[in-house]
Image (cartoon, rainbow, N blue to C red):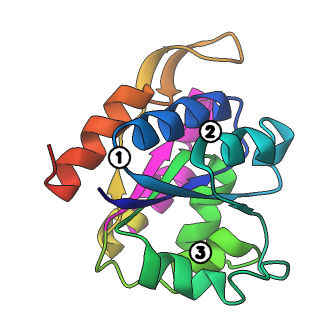
Amino acid sequence: MSNVLLCITGSISCYKAAEFASLLVKNGNDVKVVATEAALRFVGKTTFEGLTKNKVYTDMWSNEQEPIAHITLGQKWADAIFVYPASADVINKLAAGIADNLLGALFLANNFAKPFVVAPAMNSNMLLHPATQKSLQTLRDWGAKILEPGKGHLACGDDGVGRLPEPQEAFDFLKEILGTK
């Protein structure tokens, strides 16, 4: 059993994060969720609290149970941190060292002693934009693992690269990284 910190960001593919959380829990993992404000516009806290039986963390200033959540969740509690889905906005902010929310602060407090996985999900043009590509390379260079997005039909109606990998693929990727079966 592993402690997985699932970070969700603003993307229409957030619905897959609920399935991923459920899959993690069904396989004996303890899951806590950090959600950006944008993520909660797509899927509510109650969904993740019901699936994980844990409180959802949304900001740095209202975490009474974890007063320094950006330190304790990533450094002390989690065996792995998984950003699923990772929006273009968040990827570019992480690579720039911007910590204007709990996820950004958690990332800056991370020393990569534990796996930090980023799973991009966005429109093809956003993914292929030089800023996003440079940011993904920066994250790789710093030690983050990137679960490459898939190709296919996107929520915007286009066909191309940028699809969030299916929950089972994310689960298998995490198992491989953690060396679990």
Amino acid, disc 3: Ala
Task: Identify the element where label 3 is drawn.
Answer: helix
Residue plotted at (77% across, 36% down): 43
Magenta residue check for 119: yes
Residue wearing tag 1: 28
Span shown in magenta: 115-138
- Is residue 136 among the parts visible in the rendering? yes
In this rendering, would 127 be left or right of 172?
right
Q: CA distance from mark 3 to mark 2?
A: 17 Å
Task: Identify the element where label 1 is drawn.
Answer: loop
- Is residue 97 among the parts visible in the rendering? no
Residue wearing tag 3: 96
Q: Please tell me which of labels 2 and 1 falls first in the chain.
A: 1
Q: CA distance from mark 2 to mark 1?
A: 35 Å
Q: Quadrant of the N terminus?
A: bottom left
Q: Nearer the viewer, residue 181 or 13?
A: 181
Amino acid, disc 2: Met
Q: CA distance from mark 1 to mark 3?
A: 35 Å
Height in image: 153 above or below 175? above
Q: Residues within 10 Å of mark 3 (few under 14, many from 20)?
A: few
